[in-house]
Amino acid sequence: MSLDVRYPLNLPANAPPLRVLIVEDDPMMQLGLEQSLMAHPQLEIVGQAEDGYLGVQAALQLKPDLVVMDIGLPRLDGIAATQQIKAALPATHVVMLTSHQTETEIIAALSSGADAYCIKGASVERLLSAIAAAVDGAAYLDPQIARRVIDNLKPPSPTTNNANLSGRELEVLKLMVDGLSNPEIAEKLYLSPNTIKTHVRGIMNKLAVDDRVQAAVVALRSGLV
């Protein structure tokens, strides 16, 4: 990776560098990111982590301005790690940098609170564009996947069975999309964990999906939440 240090992030001239945490399990990718981003005068690498669990711990300790996050991480994936970081540090921006390009992963990543989604192998300038957009408060999608996301977010056909959800199931589904676990949903709705587990199973059956992430994707695509 090479980087033109003149490439701007549109920060004020007297602004301190953005403090960046890199969460990446591939040592070569981690090294390349560190060297490339360190070459930019408006960025400061304050830490690195090789799995999602350590990434969350590092974020809570370092309180970075920005996290560059992989998705396919050991122990705790990047989507779950992003949810935890955003819940604790809402002002911290998260840029997903990953080779994962499936519809489910893209939507789940953005639903987790990620501010930008950039594909591995893209130019460093494109990554900087993603960082700049995130810092400016704008969502950024890599051009390679933007069209796919737009297409997949089109409203479903009238024959879909999404409307079969009960009022309680819709409440549970919304909290699932917000990233809450079953015990957290139970506490919020004053129900038992077993009752929530039953609702989640019913939701997945009615939406014809296999897991919670897919349920979240269907919910977002259909406008249920």
Image (cartoon, rainbow, N blue to C red):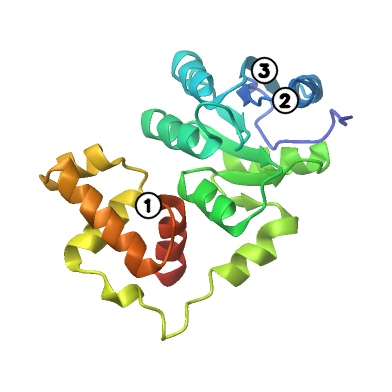
Judge by depth and name the residue closer to the eye, 18 or 21: 21
Question: At x 81% / y 41%, what residue is drawn?
Answer: 121
Q: Residue 106: x, y in percent?
A: 58, 52
> How far apart, in angstroms, are the residues tagged by discs 1 and 2?
29 Å
Vertically, is 61 above or below 172? Answer: above
Question: x, y (%) of residue 100?
Answer: 67, 46
Where does label 3 land, which residue? 45
Mark 3 or mark 1: name the one nearer the start of the chain.
3
* Residue at image location 27% in from the left, 61% down from the top: 202
Q: Residue 133 carries which label?
A: none
In this rendering, the answer to whether 36 lies above or below 95 is above
Inspect the image, locate mark 2, and give the three-letter code of the amino acid beneath it. Answer: Asp
Question: Would you name the residue on which mark 1 appears?
Answer: 177
Q: In this view, does 102 lie above or below 163?
A: above
Label 1 or label 2, whichever comes before in sequence order: 2
Amino acid type of disc 3?
Ile
Q: Position of residue 57 (x, y in %)?
A: 46, 17
Which corner quadrant of the image does residue 199 belong to?
bottom left
Q: In which quarter of the image is the C terminus?
A: bottom left
Of labels 3 and 2, earlier in sequence is 2
